[in-house]
Image (spheres, rainbow, N blue to C red):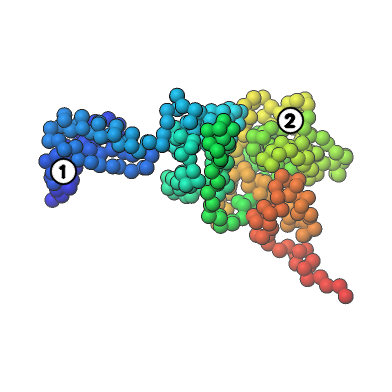
Amino acid sequence: MKSINNHTRKKTVEKGLTIYQTGRSKFWHCRLWDRRNNKYVTKTSGETDRQEATIAARNWKDSYLQQASSHLVSVATSKDAFEYYARMIPVTSKDDWVILKRPNDGILAHFGNFNVSSITTGTIRNYLTRLNDNRPTPLSNSTLKKHVIILRKVLRLAREDGIISSVPESPKLQPDKAKPRPGFEVEEFIKLCEHMQDRKKSGHLTEEFYRIALFIVFTFIRPTVHELMGLRVGDITVKKEGKEAYIEIKVNGKTGFRIAISMPEATKFFNRQVESENLRSNDYLWFPNITDRNYALRKFSLQFNKELGYAGLKHTNDGQTRSSYSLRHFALTFRLNSSAGKVNVFTLAKNAGTSVQMLEQYYIRYLKPSKNVVANLQHIEF
């Protein structure tokens, strides 16, 4: 038996706007999808004639959107618009524009025609909440902070023009529950290396791909556009010779400029790459024939993700998903473990472009005590 509340005689007026009738009333009802609030709103048209109801629905839509958008301005004509200042962010800042231009829930999709003076800490918090509401798994705090940093970067430009007097404070975020970074156990890393070697022999992987993976491990470098794929041959200097040889790397990365020192094993992968590709000082070290370095990184990352799947190593024991970053996580964890507690964490943090706090929060606290570490702890001298 049908309910008197069932919608009957539905008619689409335009995208997002429909009219319908129910058994409860003789009047046509209007239903509008409120994209900004992610919900439907309804109202009676007060009309029994369908054509009159269609006109009433369009008029109601215009009135509703005008009232709901009183804080908005015309992007095309107003210097008060958020998008006006967002367009001042250089297109070369590709990481910023990935978040700015994300089609469904990017910053411009939400804030584009906001009047910059109407953006407060509260509206930013609501935006972050909506980001998580649209996902089965909430975004990490580090990702949410990237959104806030870009938002405030745009608003600072508006402040410089005198449109606003101050930039809103960042909303406080609930602290993430700290988890170990998704790296590899030693046995898993050996399994991965053996898998990649087998894939090389069968012609499914290139020698260069294998070198990149091991280079990340023995240099602690981030697999990003600016660090890994931004390296040129001239940024790297081989120090010493023979078994004591290592490379010194000039890195412009996430935490700014640093000079990183590699483990000795990185030297052979660097030398083989330069020799096999006949590289010169100004050539990119990896995928030197690819001009678009974002594409070069995607090429490596996508293939690495496939190899993780083929090797049965895509997820950690606690369910975290591995990626090319897991090579760096393994490198840091292995260095801390293999040093038997003797490595200077400040030196390691500086070399890897991170902080002692990050090492302690995500790596050191999860280390399994090795035999040497246990011996050091239990050693007593009188």
Q: Amino acid at mark 2?
A: Arg
Q: Which mark is residue 232?
A: 2
The C terminus, quarter of image: bottom right
Q: Nearer the viewer, residue 198 or 207?
A: 207
- Residue topped by disc 1: 22
Residue 58 horizontal/vertical position (percent): 25, 31
Q: Nearer the viewer, residue 55 or 178?
A: 55
The vertical placement of 367 against 85, above or below, is below
Q: Position of residue 32 (x, y in %)?
A: 28, 38
**Relative depth, front residue between 382 and 356:** 356
Name the residue: 82% across, 35% down. Answer: 237
Q: Quadrant of residue 283?
A: top right
Residue 48 quadrant:
top left
Q: Residue at x 59, y 56 (%)?
A: 179
* Among the 4 quarters of the image, the one containing residue 146: top right
Q: Quick one: SS at disc 2?
A: loop
Q: Looking at the image, which residue sits at the far bottom? A: 382
Residue at x 70% of width, y 47% of height? 354
- Name the residue nearer the viewer: 165 or 4: 165
